[in-house]
Image (cartoon, rainbow, N blue to C red):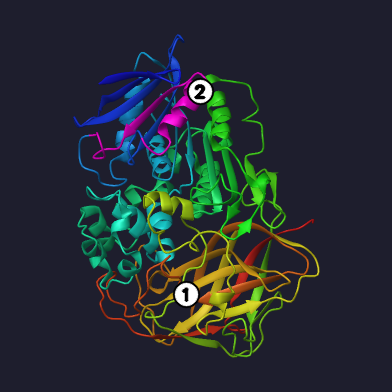
């Protein structure tokens, strides 16, 4: 252990914290200098090096305001002992670390946790073990289900996340991501060979291919299965274009309903801005600039949270509105009392066409009128020529740049956020359904779902959906999107082949948004079968996930008729 003195702090480096199985984790401890303790303590647990990613700056911020700050390397990472197995040990290790911190002479027995992404995930898991010292957590930009949010949204593989994050978390050279040609790796078949092609063979990567369904392994690390065990107030901060938005809104609603104490159920707070993963200090998400009013300092939010729950300050945190949302289009913040909003009018927008909705030049329309006797729309999905990802939920370009140490950005600059979709909508394998110009403003705030009746000649395939805001100029900006893998259309836990040629119902969870479609704008829905490399390409064969070197073209039909009323269910907010 070494001791350093700087920035008004005393820093103890590489203090060993014992876990229940004898493994020791490395902790850096930051204490206020020339102040008498003990202090309420903020804990960060990280797999990214406990001296990196702004740790010192965050520590100084909180220490200067009367807190002790502890940053701990997760098991098997950097200066900590043991082997790293993502998520598996984090609940137990989190609990044991909190117990160790809470018992130190410089801690007054009140511990809170903070951190983003994986550093937010470990907070949720540790909270489920309910140490008496833990009084609150503040997870940023993270969800509540590793399966649904991180790895298999809609049953499809989160390929871009896998390539970026999992390869970064394995091996000595993993911090230098310029070693990899991501465009090449994304197209490797069989897909499970991609880690080996990159020189990686970690067990936790192989496990992903062995567990493509929501089975007991995924349940054991899912916060959704542990809501009733969590007993503390939680502050969540995320963005409409973040990787893990779906889990954030599920976590908020789930804790309000199932939290383990009345204190927890009554003290959930959720803040969602117009950001992608790690982009909350920028005014733009992709091409769209939301103005300086969209910026928030998450540390300032967390400080008030910790002051209330760790110091007992009477600062109004527990009496303020539990939800704060940025309404895109209107570009303003608004406080709400619940999620989803109680005044929501769920409105079905039906798909229509004369059988030629292919591309924005086709005859697809969207309206609140139910469908009549209309022919289906058809297209061919070729995995060799997938629909390219253009914006959406993901890493922002500056975060990709940071991860690659100044090298090429992962999959280029148009990966996360809001972008013009017309280059995608010009394809024949993208069905486009558009309303007439709106005669008045239409606010859509809440969960967005597509009920799609479709058939395929393949035993397995994907269907994708994207909600788009079309400006009078024709500029078409993506709002939210989703995917469903055919074999998981009925259950995430059990794969079931598609019957070729049979029309079936597919529910596509497009997560959520808050967007004002202004008067004169149009609401648009895109339907296709790929969004690559955000998600992996379904080879359409029905074979085991990741093991297939074979691909085939799938012939798809999308039905919209009295018998098969495909519709987009929008959460319309009245009163504007």
User: Picture quarter containing residue 512?
Assistant: bottom right
Label 2 crowding class (10 Å Cα cut-off): few <14, some 14-19, many 20+?
many
Sequence-wise first label, 2 or 1: 2
Quadrant of the snapshot with the N terminus: top left
Residue 420 position, x and y percent, is 59, 69
Q: Is residue 573 magenta?
A: no
Left or right: where does residue 13 sit relative to residue 400?
left
Q: Which mark is residue 463?
A: 1
Q: Secondary structure at mark 2?
A: helix
Residue 314 position, x and y percent, is 63, 21
Q: Which mark is residue 78?
A: none
- Residues 185 and 506: in front is 185
Q: Which mark is residue 310?
A: 2
User: Picture quarter containing residue 157?
Assistant: bottom left
Q: Residue at x 65, y 53 (%)?
A: 290
Q: Is residue 54 magenta?
A: yes
Highlighted range, magenta: 52-80
């Amino acid at each position: 252990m070494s001791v350093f003195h700087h920035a008004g702090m005393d820093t103890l480096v590489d203090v060993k914290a014992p876990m229940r199985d004898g493994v020791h984790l490395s902790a850096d401890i930051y204490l206020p200098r020339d102040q008498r303790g003990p202090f309420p303590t903020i804990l960060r647990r990280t797999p990214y090096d406990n001296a990196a990613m702004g740790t010192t700056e965050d520590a100084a911020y909180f220490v200067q305001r009367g807190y002790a700050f502890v940053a701990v390397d997760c098991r098997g990472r950097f200066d900590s002992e043991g082997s790293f197995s993502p998520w598996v040990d984090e609940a137990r290790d989190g609990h044991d670390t909190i117990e160790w911190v809470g018992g130190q002479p410089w801690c007054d027995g009140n511990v809170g946790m903070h951190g983003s992404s994986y550093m937010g995930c470990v907070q949720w898991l540790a909270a489920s073990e309910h140490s008496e010292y833990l009084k609150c957590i503040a997870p940023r930009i993270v969800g509540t289900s590793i399966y649904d949010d991180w790895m298999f949204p809609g049953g499809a593989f989160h390929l871009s996340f896998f390539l970026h994050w999992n390869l970064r978390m394995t091996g000595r050279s993993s911090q230098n991501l310029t070693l990899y040609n991501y465009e090449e790796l994304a197209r490797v078949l069989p897909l499970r060979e991609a880690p080996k092609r990159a020189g990686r063979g970690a067990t936790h990567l192989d496990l992903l291919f062995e567990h493509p369904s929501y089975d007991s392994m995924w349940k054991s690390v899912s916060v959704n299965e542990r809501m009733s065990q969590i007993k503390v107030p939680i502050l969540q901060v995320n963005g409409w274009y973040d990787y893990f938005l779906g889990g954030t809104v599920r976590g908020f609603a789930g804790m309000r309903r199932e939290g383990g104490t009345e204190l927890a159920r009554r003290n959930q707070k959720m803040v969602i801005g117009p950001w992608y993963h790690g982009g909350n200090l920028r005014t733009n998400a992709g091409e769209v600039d939301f103005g300086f009013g969209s910026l928030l300092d998450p540390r300032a939010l967390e400080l008030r949270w910790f002051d209330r729950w760790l110091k007992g300050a009477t600062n109004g945190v527990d009496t303020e509105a539990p939800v704060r949302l940025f309404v895109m289009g209107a570009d303003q913040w608004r406080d709400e009392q619940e999620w989803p909003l109680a005044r929501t009018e769920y409105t079905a927008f039906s798909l229509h066409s004369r059988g030629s909705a292919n591309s924005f030049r086709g005859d697809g329309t969207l309206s609140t009128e139910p469908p009549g006797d209309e022919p289906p729309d058809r297209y061919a999905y070729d995995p060799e020529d997938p629909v390219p990802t253009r914006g959406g939920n993901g890493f922002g370009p500056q975060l990709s740049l940071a991860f690659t140490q100044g090298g090429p950005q992962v999959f280029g600059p148009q990966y996360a956020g809001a972008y013009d979709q017309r280059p995608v909508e010009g394809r024949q394998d993208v069905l486009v359904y558009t309303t007439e110009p709106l005669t008045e403003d239409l606010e859509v705030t809440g969960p967005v779902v597509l009920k799609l009746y479709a058939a395929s000649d393949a035993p397995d395939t994907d269907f994708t959906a994207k909600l788009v805001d079309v400006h009078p100029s024709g500029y078409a900006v993506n709002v939210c999107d989703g995917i469903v893998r055919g074999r998981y259309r009925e259950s995430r836990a059990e794969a079931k082949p598609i019957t070729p040629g049979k029309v079936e119902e597919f529910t596509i969870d497009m997560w959520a948004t808050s967007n004002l479609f202004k008067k004169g704008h149009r609401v648009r829905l895109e339907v296709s079968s790929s969004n690559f490399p955000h998600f992996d390409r379904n080879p359409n064969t029905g074979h085991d996930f990741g093991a297939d070197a074979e691909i085939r073209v799938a012939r798809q039909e999308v039905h919209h008729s009295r018998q098969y009323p495909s519709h987009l269910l929008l959460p319309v907010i009245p009163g504007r």
